Image: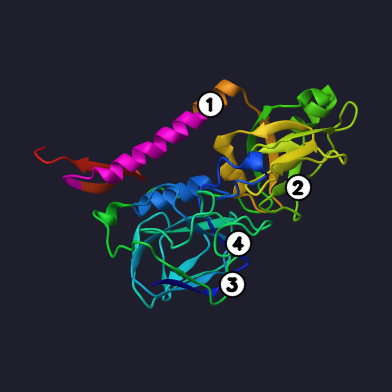
Amino acid sequence: MGILIQTPGVLTTVQDLGRMGHQACGVSPSGAMDQKSTRLANILVGNRENEGVLEVTLGGTSIVFRRSNVIAICGAPAPAVLDRQPVPFYKALSVQAGQTLSFQYAPQGMRTYIAFAGGLDIPLVMGSRSTHLKSGIGGFHGRKLQQGDYIGFRSPRAYLPHQELRRVEEEHFPRSGETVSIRLLLGPQEDAFTKLGQGTLFESLYEISQNSDRMGYRLIGQPIESKNGSDIITDGIALGSVQIPPSGLPIIMMADRQTTGGYAKIATVITQDISLLAQCPPGVKLRFVQCDVETAQALRIAGRRNIEALIRRFQHMTGSSYWVQVNGKTYFVTLEAGT
């Protein structure tokens, strides 16, 4: 027993952290666009970080529970109700068989993630439960979810230890029209572009086009000037690669990116900013900020340490724990036994 899709919304798919190790064979990694929200949702319900979740794009989805379980919702704050009662985000929550979870459309951000304790009964394909829509690989029959689809639970839980304390601070995401700063590393083919072209990238505002999807974000703005065109011998594409096609308008490669491409890549979005970028809806304006490798690595390490600290907190809860508010700020405090 598990969940029944009552209303699929604009685009709801099964995703995890991606299908790694197969790009040499032409298989896209796919995976969750916002990996930070995916990790947080899974950690809150006691799953491995890489467990399959539902990625709900823009909201409008409703699901019926056929068995009780513990869930967590992270990402874009699409207003949600469980049998007409508001549902908190970023918190472990028990749901009962027969209840319906419904989302309105997200006023900010793009993607909402629902994790289920014990995981969804979705087969592994090349080591991943992620859906790659263009190839029809993985997930639920390789496609987006439709009304009437049923997905079982593998090992559901009615309640988790210290469940009332399994929550984290909510994230804030941009709305259409806002300006967001995204950090870039130059390269690998920045030498294919003039100094004027490189300056244009960092001095201009770019808008995310409506013609954007899980494969890539197309940008509207000032064209990037190249030296002798941007065609190159096809080579590998990394997550966050900023390709410059003949039009000069940047395309940022996202989760469902192709494995190789024949356009020069002027820069790459740093890993720490990918989740924020994934939550930027069309109409958001991007301001690019140049970053160096050492800073990008330090940010990546700090982000990873924060995730590991959160895992340890939930794995080793002992004594009495409380959320305490002081001067408008909330702190998590644990009193160990004997103190």
Q: Which residue lies furthest to the front in this view?
A: 25
**Location of residue 339 (image quadrant):** top left
Q: Residues within 10 Å of mark 4 (few under 14, many from 20)?
A: some
Name the amino acid, label 3.
Answer: Gln
Which circle's residue, 1 or 3, is located before the other in the chain?
A: 3
Residue drawn at (8%, 38%), measured in percent from left and top? 338
Q: Position of residue 63 (x, y in %)?
A: 48, 72
Residue on which the image places disc 4: 142
Q: How far apart are marks 4 and 2 (CA)?
A: 25 Å
Q: How far separated are the C-alphas under marks 1 and 3?
A: 40 Å
Task: Give the residue number, with chain letter if any, for mark 2.
Answer: 218
| Quarter placement of the N terminus | bottom left
Q: Position of residue 13 (x, y in %)?
A: 57, 61
Which disc is residue 146 wearing?
3
Q: In this view, does 4 lie above or below 178?
A: below
Q: What stretch is highlighted in magenta?
A: 299-320
